[in-house]
Image (tube, rainbow, N blue to C red):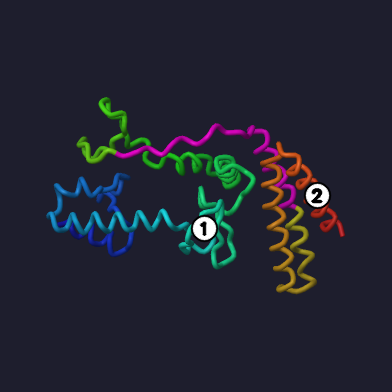
Amino acid sequence: ECWLQHVQLSMREGRGAAGCMDVNCSLILTPDAATSLLSPESVVIYRKCVEEITLFEKKTLRCPHCAKDVLRSGSRSAICGCGTVICSTCEAGDHWPVFCSVYLKYRAARDGKEDVADDLWFPMLNNLSKCPKCGNYVMKNGGQKVRLIDVAPPPPPDPILPSIISSTLAARKTIEERRKEIEKRLEAIGKAASVEVLKAINKLVHLLELALLSSKRAKSRQAASSIRLAFFAFANT
């Protein structure tokens, strides 16, 4: 009865597969595992709900800015109604030409969350074990095999050196320090105008990050140099 209510709540809230009722457990209740807990009729409804939500999630992206669902366009990026451009692979803000693995690692270092990138790639790795017969991975619940699942492939080899991440972080810090000075000076032109200027600076900072992270490309190095010159020319006026 408790599991039935838990599954019904999960379906009503559109979460798809229900999580374990133990708050310290990160496993999910698969439709196959639900056969031992729910009636056959309830399992059919639960399986259909999980499949529909899974299909919907494959067709949509979650905007990192406004959290709305955006239909995948079939290209490397999609545009949300709020104007945010989203990477179709990792669902972060668009970061072309930087690899997803590189951008996620940089963002984790920038935000002080070094383990974020790994969590994105392997959310349930610690709860899996390899089946000696078929080679697939199994998710355990109380020691009982509940379902064979595929493990997400590991990220491609990291093409970026730690020094590039460090230099990008240093460049961002320098600009952020100058940005604070500019913000004080902008008080003289009014709030509305200063907001627009700061938005433009934020875009420049993001472009500089991408240019530095992909600095093995000649065009990226040129872009990074141009952005620095433009920013400091403005900051010194």
Residue 83: image quadrant is bottom right
Which residue type does callout 2 highlight? Ser
Q: Which residue, as the protein is rendered here, is positioned at the far front? A: 74
Q: Is residue 2 above or below residue 90?
A: below
Which residue bears the numbered disc 1? 73
Q: Position of residue 31 (x, y in %)?
A: 23, 49
The x, y position of residue 124, in whole percent, is 36, 40
Based on the picture, tell me whether residue 155 belongs to the magenta stretch: yes
Residue bounds of the magenta highlight: 149-177
Q: Amino acid at mark 1?
A: Ser
- Asked which secondary structure carries label 1, the reply is loop
Q: Is residue 191 above or below residue 173?
A: below
Which residue: 55% across, 32% down?
157
User: Does the magenta run of residues contain 8?
Assistant: no
Residue 199 locus on image (x, y percent): 69, 63
Res. 148 mark: none
Horizontally, is 67 left or right of 111 in the view? Answer: left
